[in-house]
Amino acid sequence: MLRWIIPLIVIAVVEFYSFQAIRTVSKSKIVLAVYILATLITIIYIVYNFLQFDRSVGQTQQSMLAMGMFLIFVVPKILIAVVLFGEDIFRFFKAIIVHFMGDNDGGKFMPTRRRFVSQIALGLASIPFTSLIYGMTIGKYNFKVIKKTLSFPDLPDSFDGVTITHISDIHSGSFDNHEKIEYAIDLINEQNSDLVLFTGDIVNTHAKEMHPWIETFKKIHNPVLGKYSILGNHDYGEYSDWSSEEAKEENFKEIKDLHRQIDFKLLLNQNVKIQKGKDFIRLVGVENWGKHFKKAGDLNIASEGVSNDEFKILMSHDPSHWDAEVQHDERNYHLTLSGHTHGFQFGIEIPGFLKWSPVQYVYKQWAGLYENMGRFIYVNRGFGFHAFPGRVGIMPEITVITLKKGGFTVKDL
């Protein structure tokens, strides 16, 4: 019970200030009544869905909508509360000064709340309000193709110019629009890459989430160098209650088989030779290894038979693996491909000027390309979405990487 007290107090304070802002700006009883009614309906809907959440079922369209409504309900009002609380501090100190000067406002201790401050607060609140609605309606399917060219001095000659399409974090259980997913698959195929790689989280929890989408994802073309995949933290069924360990294990087997059904070769702490002409590179795929999540990945087992001087691409779902182990490994993994963070599905990205998301305070490598002593990691922002049914500022991504022979350089296309 105690764990609910602080959140309830915060929501009560936020709601108090929000009502103050509305009442200051508009004296219409109809407006106030509509606001109160809409607030009560929203609170009832959110509380009902949170109380109905069943861990054995996991995330549903309804629970995601409730989460979206919660954010729309709370985040803008927090801004209102901050602005009006700041005004209250000013009003308080002004009241003390006026009190000792004997010039109270009509005998009141606190000066009247100013209308323009409430207007500013409501204007600021409209920014996250409209952004969250955009993210839930348009942003979550606003797929972006991001292209990078990476040059390596030891890239085998035959691989000069090879292209890789990288996707991650499908989270098929969150989808609700076949047309948009078909469009995204068409985007993937339009890249006509030599190699397609998927770095985990095919579902939220249950294998059945992918069943309506198998035929859609089978349409991803089979490129000359193949399609390969790995598992992500959500693929192990860790975030659900199961009737038995056998049920959990059966679900896990079905999830692994989904990769076969969409024509991807699943690498489970394994590596394969990717042959082109007389040359080859090594593709290494580890199971999930996360600083904060399941550690099923084993880089040593996955790299058996791989020599230090071979050119290597590593697929590892969680970028914390690169930060903790990979970037300093003597085997020299030239390029690591990850996902997992989704860029928090919320942030600000202005190319060449600003890149920010709350997730950067948890993950050092959270979206895009990072380098350390000629070793690179690319963190895909994710194909799908999870928990919050939208994306604000951090769009779903299809990455295309071109490998070039030469000195270490990076080029955006």
Image (tube, rainbow, N blue to C red):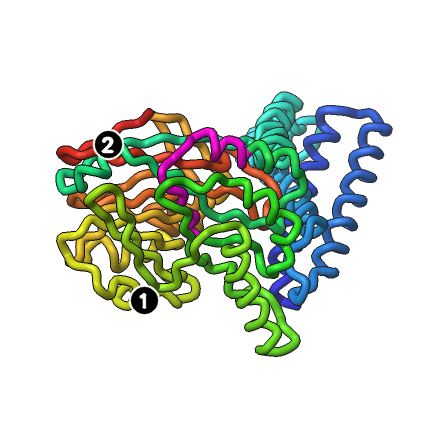
Residue name at image x 18 percent, y 41 percent: 155
Q: Is residue 54 above or below residue 221?
A: below
- The residue that appears at 55% across and 50% down in the rendered structure is 171
Q: Is residue 5 visible?
A: yes
Confirm or deny contact between disc 2 and disc 1 (CB under 8 A).
Answer: no
Quarter of the image for residue 142 reads top right
Image label count? 2
The residue where tag 1 is placed is 298
Within the magenta stretch, is there residue 192?
yes
- SS of the residue at dot 2? strand
Q: Residue furthest front?
A: 277
Question: Where is residue 240 shown, x and y percent of the image?
Answer: 60, 66
Residue 110 position, x and y percent, is 64, 34
Which residues are drawn in magenta?
184-199
Residue drawn at 71 percent across, 27 percent down: 24
- Quarter of the figure that contains the N terminus: bottom right
Q: Is residue 98 left or right of residue 343?
A: right
**Residue named by callout 2:** 410
Q: Nearer the viewer, residue 277 or 27?
A: 277
Q: Which mark is residue 197?
A: none
In the rendered image, which quarter contains the C terminus? Answer: top left
Instruction: Give me the C-alpha separation between circle 2 and circle 1.
Output: 29 Å
Residue density around tag 1, few if under 14, some if 14–19, many if 20 or more, within 10 Å: some
| Left or right, 24 with reference to 327 | right
Foreground residue among 20 and 386: 386
Three-letter code for the amino acid on which mark 2 is drawn: Val
Question: In the image, is 139 to the left or to the right of 15?
Answer: left
| Sequence-first disc among 2 and 1 | 1
Q: Is residue 314 above or below residue 162?
A: below
Q: Secondary structure at mark 1?
A: loop
Tell me what residue is drawn at x 76 percent, y 44 percent: 42
Tell me where residue 328 sits by quadrant. bottom left
